[in-house]
Image: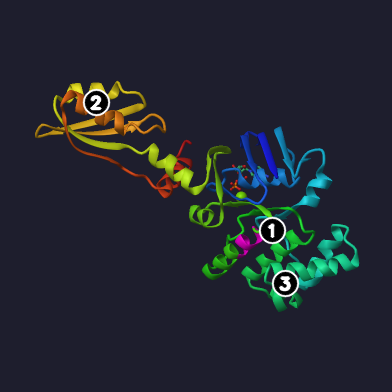
């Protein structure tokens, strides 16, 4: 439904999006996760034909974002980071106005407004002036706006930002429900939110994609690259040297007390090196009293990404 290939976009000297490639399949809810300034909005704006890219290609429902923008707009519903709503208009009038911009006739507009009122749980609020609605309710009007022409794909930019906890919970629930009928790409800087709503996550940092996968896949990747702690009795230098010689070992830090060597082993890739270490110790006749993974959570991984991003001189 969405294909993005080697997309790059600069703002002056800033490379906001850097060689980004990903796809979203029909029926998926995909989270675009990254700290502030990562390039989420810029990417979503390219997809919604808001601005061009410098390099690469992108398509939505098979239509080229750069050459077939009319068809792309017809198939995509976009909820921008801050939706420009008109406070003096009633929600119904606003949605009617927006539907007219999509070229919809009177009957179609009437039907569409009825549909989105239900889909977005607007109820009687549809006849209230937008300025009198709560922030959460205004966000639902924004979603109704994105859905009024019944697009196949929904693109939501930080849909829960600025909402209170109850509104956040309701909005997440609503998005999940919308995901039953629409393919959704939503951006967020909150790991927990993406884990809750999405089947798959794309993590972006400094304009580059650093990881893509389901929550389980990401957790596995993160824990596979977590350090191992092994405690082995035997000749310190030889133990360290032999383990370092195994495949898939990145670095080792060793400390020794009472004849026991405590080794913190950082794998170089995602392969599981525990079996090789165990076999080595057994072959050499070294006693091992512990081997465990210092399991990093997805949370740790994401916090690390954000911290690196904010480090000075980065
Ligand atoms: N219109 C713009 N003009 C100049 N720089 C921009 C503009 N929009 C975004 N940027 C820069 O591009 C980078 C990515 O921004 P953005 O896509 O908004 O990130 P995110 O949505 O992930 O917070 C940031 O460094 C930001 O300052
Ligand atoms: Mg943004």
C-alpha distance separating marks 3 and 2: 69 Å
Look at the magenta stretch and give its main secondary structure.
helix
Magenta part of the chain:
174-179
Residue that label 1 marks: 181
Left or right of 65, for residue 312: left
Of labels 1 and 3, the one closer to you: 1
Quadrant assignment, res 144: bottom right
Q: Where is residue 75 in the image (x, y as percent from the top left)?
A: 77, 51
Left or right of 188, for residue 77: right
Q: Which of 296 and 85 is in front in this view?
A: 296
Q: Is mark 2 on a helix, strand or loop?
A: helix
Q: Is mark 3 on a helix, strand or loop?
A: helix
Mark 1 and mark 3 lie on one chain; the one further toward the N terminus is 3
Quadrant assignment, res 113: bottom right
Query: Residue at 71% across / 54% down in the picture?
Result: 78
Q: Is residue 11 visible?
A: no
Residue that label 2 marks: 280
Mark 2 closeness class: few <14, some 14–19, many ≥20 residues within 10 Å:
some
Q: Is residue 47 visible?
A: yes
């Amino acid at each position: 439904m969405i294909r993005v290939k080697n997309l790059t976009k600069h703002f002056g000297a800033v490379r906001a999006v850097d060689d980004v490639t990903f796809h979203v399949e029909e029926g998926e809810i995909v989270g675009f996760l990254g700290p502030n300034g990562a390039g989420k909005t810029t990417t979503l704006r390219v997809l919604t034909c808001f601005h061009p890219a410098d390099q690469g290609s992108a398509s939505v429902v098979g239509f080229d974002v750069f050459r077939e923008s009319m068809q792309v707009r017809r198939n995509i519903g976009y909820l921008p980071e801050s939706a420009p709503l008109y406070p003096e208009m009633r929600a119904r009038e606003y949605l009617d106005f927006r539907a007219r911009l999509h070229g919809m006739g009177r009957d179609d507009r009437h039907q569409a407004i009825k549909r989105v009122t239900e889909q977005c749980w607007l109820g009687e609020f549809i006849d209230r002036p937008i300025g009198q609605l709560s922030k959460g309710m205004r966000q639902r009007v924004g979603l109704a706006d994105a859905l009024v022409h019944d697009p196949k794909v929904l693109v939501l930019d930080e849909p829960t930002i600025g909402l209170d906890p109850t509104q956040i919970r309701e909005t997440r629930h609503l998005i999940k429900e919308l995901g039953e009928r629409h393919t959704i790409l939503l951006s967020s800087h909150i790991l927990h939110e993406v884990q809750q709503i999405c089947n798959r996550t794309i993590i972006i940092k400094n304009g580059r994609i650093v990881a893509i996968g389901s929550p389980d896949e990401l957790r596995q990747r993160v824990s596979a690259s977590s350090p191992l702690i092994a405690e082995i009795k035997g000749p310190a230098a030889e133990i360290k040297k032999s383990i370092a010689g195994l495949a898939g070992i990145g670095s080792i830090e060793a400390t020794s007390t009472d004849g026991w060597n405590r080794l913190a082993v950082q794998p170089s890739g995602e392969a599981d090196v525990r079996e090789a270490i165990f076999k080595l110790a057994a072959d050499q006749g070294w006693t091992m009293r512990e081997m465990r993974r210092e399991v990093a959570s997805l949370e740790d991984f994401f916090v690390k990404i954000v911290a690196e991003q904010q480090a000075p001189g980065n």
